[in-house]
Image (spheres, rainbow, N blue to C red):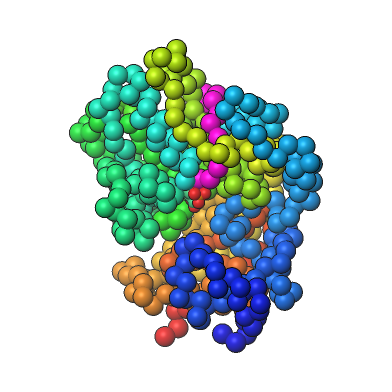
């Protein structure tokens, strides 16, 4: 541990007053707090000059590098022009232009944009909007949601209600809505000899049974398209999304696509839903939306949904969900610049090359005695560590093997932050193949240390 920077003044001040997310603060008695002074490209630079390659895009937000000069310039310009204005009764160019651009780039039929200011808030909006749509249509009996096992949609109470990762959910369960859980089409859970496409079909059959029983009380089915990220980077076949779209139509329930983590090129297409050629009724976006610069989220929906709310004031049908910073001009301008980079540069083509390199470098790990799976969808790759490869028995979670990989990464100048014992790679798109090599080499060394003894 003493190879880490000595707790400097900034860290002491931090630990005196701050309370960090997703952290048992007691851990910082032994786990270092890393003080960061600045960022450049895929790198974070510590106050002591140490550099950390950001292998996880700072919680999956960053696309085009830290302190990206183009985005920074747009932000500075906007800050000098209009920093914020109430978004009820007032509007502004960045919000309108961003909505136009989002409608243009998302799957067909998503013509309306509602802004919020983080991923969880977007989920709250989608859940409330779906419920309220049915209410306005005279179906107040529809009050429930179907979510997938292993799903994660955020940690506010509504978003947590439709999430199924025990670590986040269990403690707060008494406060939450009870979703109907449909078995995830996760390809890791394939039966012997079963292909990912067959798993998708089997799981669609199970979803059908749930819909037969519950559709009358269900507002929507919510999923993370293609990759269940926080649930351990579990991946599934696009056929599931196509089948889900058909089932939602057949049983008259909404399809909510949470593309907060997988949107904006992560899975190989601009949006994951494109790989199944489907348009959801609601699409939630955040994280990469601003290139990792500022909190902003957007919920896109159809004209049909919008029209169910459009009536005389006295009808009381208006959608009710407001945040002070809705449609913040700085965040919208930064998002516009992020989308402009997608237009101006061959981002998806380059990502394909980077993803292929990552795949090639990770392939040998498939034979590792403590690796049960190496999986990848575009610019998301994951390596699952287990105690017993044949039985796929996990290590006891108290052993915190993944944490050992994290700590090793820090000593080697790499930010790898495993989800439990799933070591994953989700770098910014500006990463080079040499930097990918560095991340993978560090992860392999870390894995060797983590599984030893
Ligand atoms: C798929 C998905 N949905 C929602 C969220 C919540 O977003 P936020 O952390 O901005 O509230 C996350 C965050 O990791 C996510 O991965």
Query: Which residue sits at x=72%, y=62%?
Result: 39
Depth check: give the residue in front, 225 or 156: 156
User: What span is colored magenta in the figure?
Assistant: 109-119
Quadrant containing the C terminus in the rendered view:
bottom left
Left or right, 20 with respect to 329, comes to left
Left or right, 316 with respect to 299, comes to left
Q: Where is residue 181 in the image (x, y as percent from the top left)?
A: 28, 45
Query: Which residue sits at x=29%, y=53%?
Result: 173
Residue 276 in sight here: no
Residue ranking furthest to the left: 213
Residue 385 in sight here: yes
Q: In terms of image quadrants, where is residue 334? A: top right
As displayed, is residue 217 above or below residue 73?
above
Q: Position of residue 387 (x, y in %)?
A: 37, 75
Left or right, 15 with respect to 172, comes to right
Depth check: give the residue in front, 75 or 246: 75
Query: Which residue sits at x=45%, y=76%?
Result: 26
Query: Which residue sits at x=43%, y=20%?
Result: 309
Depth check: give the residue in front, 152 or 316: 316
Q: Position of residue 300 (x, y in %)?
A: 52, 31
Q: In terms of image quadrants, where is residue 212? A: top left
As displayed, is residue 112 above or below residue 413?
above
Quadrant containing the N terminus in the rendered view:
bottom right
Q: Where is residue 223 in the image (x, y as percent from the top left)?
A: 41, 42
Residue ranking furthest to the top: 312
As displayed, is residue 255 above or below residue 412?
above
Magenta residue check for 396: no
Depth check: give the residue in front, 289 or 423: 289
As displayed, is residue 24 above or below residue 289?
below
Q: How many marks?
A: 0
């Amino acid at each position: 541990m003493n190879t880490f920077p000595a707790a400097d003044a900034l860290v002491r001040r931090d630990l005196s007053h701050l309370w960090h997310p997703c952290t048992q603060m007691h851990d910082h008695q032994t786990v270092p707090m890393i003080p960061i002074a600045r960022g450049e490209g895929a790198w974070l630079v510590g106050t002591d000059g140490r550099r950390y390659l950001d292998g996880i895009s700072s919680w999956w937000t960053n696309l085009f590098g830290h302190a990206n000069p183009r985005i920074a310039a747009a932000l500075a310009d906007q800050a000098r022009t209009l920093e914020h204005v109430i978004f009820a009764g007032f509007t502004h160019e960045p919000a309108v232009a961003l909505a136009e651009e989002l409608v243009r780039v998302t799957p067909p039929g998503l013509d309306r944009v509602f802004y919020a200011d983080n991923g969880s808030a977007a989920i709250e909006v989608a859940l409330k909007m779906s419920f309220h749509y049915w209410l306005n249509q005279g179906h107040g009996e529809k009050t429930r949601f179907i979510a997938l096992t292993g799903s994660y949609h955020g940690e506010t109470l509504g978003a947590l209600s439709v999430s199924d990762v025990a670590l986040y959910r269990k403690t707060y369960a008494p406060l939450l809505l009870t979703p109907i859980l449909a078995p995830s089409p996760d390809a890791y859970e394939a039966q012997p000899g079963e292909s990912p496409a067959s798993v998708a079909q089997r799981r669609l059959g199970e979803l059908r049974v749930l819909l037969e029983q519950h559709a009358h009380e269900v507002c929507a089915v919510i999923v993370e398209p293609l990759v269940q990220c926080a649930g351990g980077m579990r991946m599934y076949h696009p056929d599931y999304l196509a089948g889900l779209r058909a089932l939602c139509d057949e049983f008259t329930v909404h399809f909510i696509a949470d593309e907060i983590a997988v949107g904006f090129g992560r899975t190989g297409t601009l949006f994951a839903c494109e790989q199944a050629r489907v348009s959801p009724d609601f699409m939630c976006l955040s994280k990469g939306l601003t290139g990792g610069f500022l909190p902003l989220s957007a919920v896109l929906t159809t004209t049909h949904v919008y029209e169910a709310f459009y009536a005389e004031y006295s009808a009381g049908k208006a959608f009710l969900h407001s945040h002070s910073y809705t449609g913040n001009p700085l965040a919208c301008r930064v998002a516009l610049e992020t989308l402009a980079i997608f237009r101006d540069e061959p981002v998806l083509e380059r990502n394909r090359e980077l993803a292929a390199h990552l795949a090639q470098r990770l392939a040998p790990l498939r034979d590792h005695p403590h690796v049960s799976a190496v999986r990848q969808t575009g610019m998301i790759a994951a390596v699952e560590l287990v105690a017993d490869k044949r039985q796929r028995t996990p290590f006891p979670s108290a052993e915190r093997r993944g944490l050992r990989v994290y700590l090793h990464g820090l000593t080697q100048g790499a930010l790898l932050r495993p989800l439990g014992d799933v070591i994953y790679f989700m770098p910014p798109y500006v990463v080079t193949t040499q930097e990918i090599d560095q991340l993978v080499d560090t992860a392999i060394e870390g894995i060797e240390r983590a599984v030893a003894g």
